C-alpha cells in the first residue's frame, strides 16, 4: 500500500502532496521526481500492472462458460509495463529522482514532512 505525505517549506511556503521517493501499491509503482524547469515535485508512474486480454470461452452444445468461471484456469494474466520517469507538464523538461529528506525545488531549503500520511492508496 502506497502512502502520500504533505511536504512543506518553511521558508518559501511551498506545499506539495507526494510519496517522498519510490513507493508501490498493488497495481502500480511511483517515484517522486523534481522537475528543474517547472521547479515542482511530482509523483510519476514507473510501473503499472496491465491485464492481458481474456482467454477464449469454453463452449459446449448448450452453454458458454466464461474463463472466469472455469476452475484452475486463469481468466487474465497480469503483466507489468514499465515507464521512464518524465515531467507530466513536458516530457522534455530536466528531471531528477527526489528522496526524502530532500530540498525544496524553489528555494533550496529542506522540506518538512507531516507525521501521518495524507492518503493511503493501492
Image (tube, grey):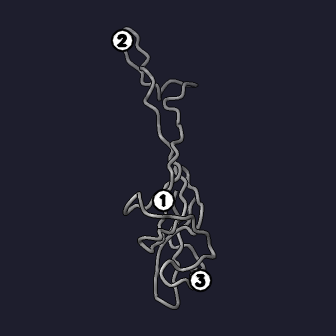
Q: Residue at x 49, y 29 (%)?
A: 75
Quick one: 35 or 6, which is closer to the camera?
35
Where residue 12 is drawn, which disc sits there? none
Residue lying furthest right: 101
Q: Secondary structure at mark 3?
A: loop
Q: How many marks?
A: 3
Estimate the x, y position of residue 108 in percent, counting from the top left: 55, 83
Identify the mark nearer the N-term, 3 or 2: 2
Q: Mark 2–mark 1 contact, CB under 8 Å?
A: no
Circle nearer the viewer, 2 or 1: 1
CA gap, disc 3 to disc 2?
68 Å
Residue bearing mark 3? 110
Quarter of the image that includes the N terminus: bottom right
Disc 2 packing (10 Å; few <14; some 14–19; many ≥20) = few
- Give the Cα separation between the discs numbered 2 and 1: 49 Å
Indicate the secondary structure of the residue bearing disc 2. loop
Judge whether 78 appears above or below 97 on screen. above
Q: Nearer the viewer, residue 106 or 6?
A: 106
Q: Which class describes the residues within 10 Å of circle 1: few (<14), some (14-19), or many (20+)?
A: many
Image position, residue 114 (x, y; %): 57, 80
Say if 14 sits above or below 11 in the image: above
Nearest to the eye among marks 3 and 2: give it.
Answer: 3
Q: Report the residue at 51% width, 91% height from top.
A: 11
Q: Pointer 2: what residue? A: 62
Q: Is residue 59 left or right of residue 110?
A: left
The mark nearer the N terminus, 2 or 1, is 1
Residue 44 - label: 1
Mark 1 lies on a secondary structure that is strand
Which residue is found at the position 47% from the left and 29% from the top?
68
Give me the C-alpha separation between circle 3 and circle 1: 21 Å
Amino acid at each position: 500500500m502506497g502512502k502520500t505525505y504533505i511536504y512543506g517549506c518553511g521558508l518559501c511556503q511551498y506545499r506539495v502532496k507526494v510519496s517522498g521517493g519510490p513507493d508501490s501499491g498493488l497495481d502500480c509503482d511511483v517515484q517522486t521526481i523534481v522537475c528543474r524547469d517547472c521547479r515542482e515535485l511530482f509523483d510519476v508512474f514507473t510501473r503499472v500492472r496491465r491485464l492481458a486480454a481474456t482467454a477464449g470461452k469454453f463452449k459446449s452444445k448448450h452453454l458458454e462458460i466464461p474463463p472466469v468461471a472455469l476452475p484452475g484456469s486463469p481468466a487474465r494474466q497480469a503483466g507489468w509495463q514499465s515507464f521512464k520517469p518524465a515531467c507530466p507538464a513536458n516530457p522534455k523538461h530536466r528531471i531528477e529522482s527526489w528522496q526524502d529528506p530532500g530540498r525544496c525545488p524553489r528555494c533550496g531549503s529542506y522540506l518538512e514532512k507531516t507525521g501521518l500520511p495524507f492518503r493511503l492508496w493501492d
